[in-house]
Amino acid sequence: MQAMKEPRIEITDNLDLLLSVMPPHVREQIERLEDLPALLEVVLDLGRQPEARFPQRVVTLSREPVSRDDLDFMIGRIGSFTSDNRAGIERTLHRISALRNRLGEIIGLTCRVGRAVYGTVEIVRDVVESGKSVLLLGRPGVGKTTLLREAARVLADDLSKRVVIVDTSNEIAGDGDIPHPGIGRARRMQVPAPALQHAVMIEAVENHMPEVVVIDEIGTQAETLAARTIAERGVQLIATAHGTTLENLVANPTLADLIGGIHAVTLSDEEARRRRTQKTVLERKAPPTFDVLIEIHDQDRFAVHADVAQVVDAVLRDQPSRPQIRVRRADGGVDMEQSPLRAPGAGAEAPEPERRAVRIFPYAVSRDRLERAIRDLGVHATVADHPRSADVVLTLRALAKKRPKKLRELMVDSTRVHTVTGNTHARIIEFLRELFEIPTDNREQTEALREAEEAIANVIAQRQAITLAPQNPHLRRLQHELAEAYGLMSESTGSGHLRRVVVQPR
């Protein structure tokens, strides 16, 4: 393991400016909350109770439902909404999105807290400063846009490069004509509508001579072509795209061009025998638009694919992907595990092949819960995008008994089918434990659930919060689900081995 220097991380959110546009009775309740630095968003839906949402819980802010006057109060203070139903607050990163009825009237608002986080780019700063084009992947909310903002600032301020941000919906540099200081000296081009992002990307290169172009969420064929055009002109690209892993892009016909594109090739009999494959194989069509791909697993764990062309070729040959894993420690430092892959001709002895991850396709089972369960248990598995590329199909037992025709048509004969009795995190964990033969301490689990049940009974009777004993992530998850089943609220507090669940009345 190699260690990187300890970065300094600072967070600014201008939360007071977001609270200032909210109805007074809602603002007062929010200001009373203890963990405001963790607030994700505030939801105001007409006729429903207002809610404050945190990573592990939802807080009801008032027993009185949101009124039309409450919505009008906010709408009158935040300016106009764009064609994608988004508005903002001048020189902040807060985003306010609208729900409309069929007549176009606003009947709900989602107020997302925007935060500028300084120092997060340190974990991949060497990659960003290398001059290579970098593509970021990760689930929504994992920090892709925050990293883009930081990368733009570092390249513009510390390396004095000409950086232009193509800012669709003002996600990166905030609302208003003057960009948020979080982007440093980088310049920002606003996009009138999401459908015009590709045109603004080309305009940025043709009119403003950037050395670096920063783009959030490449998602259409036109945008992938625009990205290739920019890269071919020698401009460094820093961008995000839909997907969580490189394999997602390989299987996505719209975005595959970002990593070189995929097409079927028919081999000669001699070549097929030499490769020991079937005659028709998938191969990369062209050089990738992006040189490096970074998978953001969570805010503190990144997987860096340093040579996208080499990795894509390996994936198409069903060989394991071996990225460099970078982990941010609790003290802010970064550990790096060097990838054992060697460049062709390097002269080093080839490493022993790694056992390929088990590919699981969820059919009528929550993909998010399966991914979370895989992370919680740390098993060597990935979520497949299609049954034909899966080793195992996971579905509901009741559905499997019906043997749906659609599932039978999608599968191949060698695919195993496993079932769970319910679409819950606990049932999926049980499936993974059985699949990977992981022993479970039933006594420990029984004790944790027994404690939660006693606490739930007392919370219902006394209407007071109760704190449970510290547990591991899996057992805390079961306790959260139990509290939810009884209509109660719960949250995790503390850190490390002292993290525990607090059960609260709703």
Image (cartoon, grey):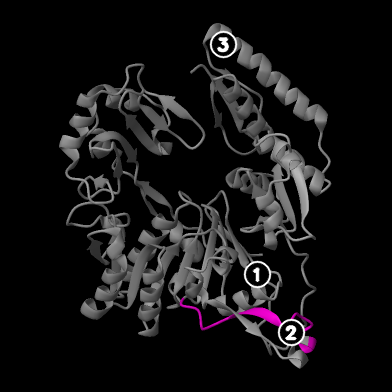
Disc 2 residue type (three-letter): Ala
Quarter of the image where one finds residue 189:
bottom left
Which residue corresponds to the image point at 18% horizontal and 30% vertical from the top-left?
Answer: 73
Instruction: Determine which residue is flagged by label 2.
Output: 348
Which residue corresponds to the image point at 30% horizontal and 65% vertical from the top-left?
Answer: 197
Task: Tell me residue 301's x, y (percent).
Answer: 57, 56
Camera-nearest label, 3 or 1: 3
Q: Judge from the rendering whether residue 142 lies leftward or rightward of residue 301; answer left or right.
A: left
> Of residues 143 and 485, which is closer to you in this image?
485
Task: Tell me residue 316's x, y (percent).
Answer: 65, 74
Give the spatial CA distance, label 2 vs label 1: 15 Å
Image quarter in which the N terminus is found:
bottom right
* Numbered badge on residue 338: 1
Q: Which element type, helix, strand or loop, lies under badge 3?
A: helix
- From where the camera sits, is residue 119 visible? no
User: Mark 2 touching mark 3, by CB under 8 A?
Assistant: no
Q: Which element type, helix, strand or loop, lies under badge 2?
A: loop
Q: Judge from the rendering whether residue 95 lies leftward or rightward of residue 354; answer left or right.
A: left
Total number of numbered labels? 3
Instruction: Determine which residue is flagged by label 3.
Output: 460
Camera-nearest label, 2 or 3: 3
Q: Residue furthest top?
A: 461
Which residue corresponds to the image point at 77% horizontal and 49% vertical from the top-left?
Answer: 417
Of the two numbered discs 2 and 1 on the same chain, state the one appearing first in sequence.
1
Task: Tell me residue 432's x, y (percent).
Answer: 75, 45
Of the two numbered discs 2 and 3 on the same chain, state the one appearing first in sequence.
2
* Numbered badge on residue 198: none
Disc 3 residue type (three-letter): Ile
Q: What span is in magenta?
A: 273-289
Disc 1 residue type (three-letter): Gln
Asked whether 327 falls inside the magenta stretch, the response is no
In the displayed structure, 254 sits above or below 442; it is below
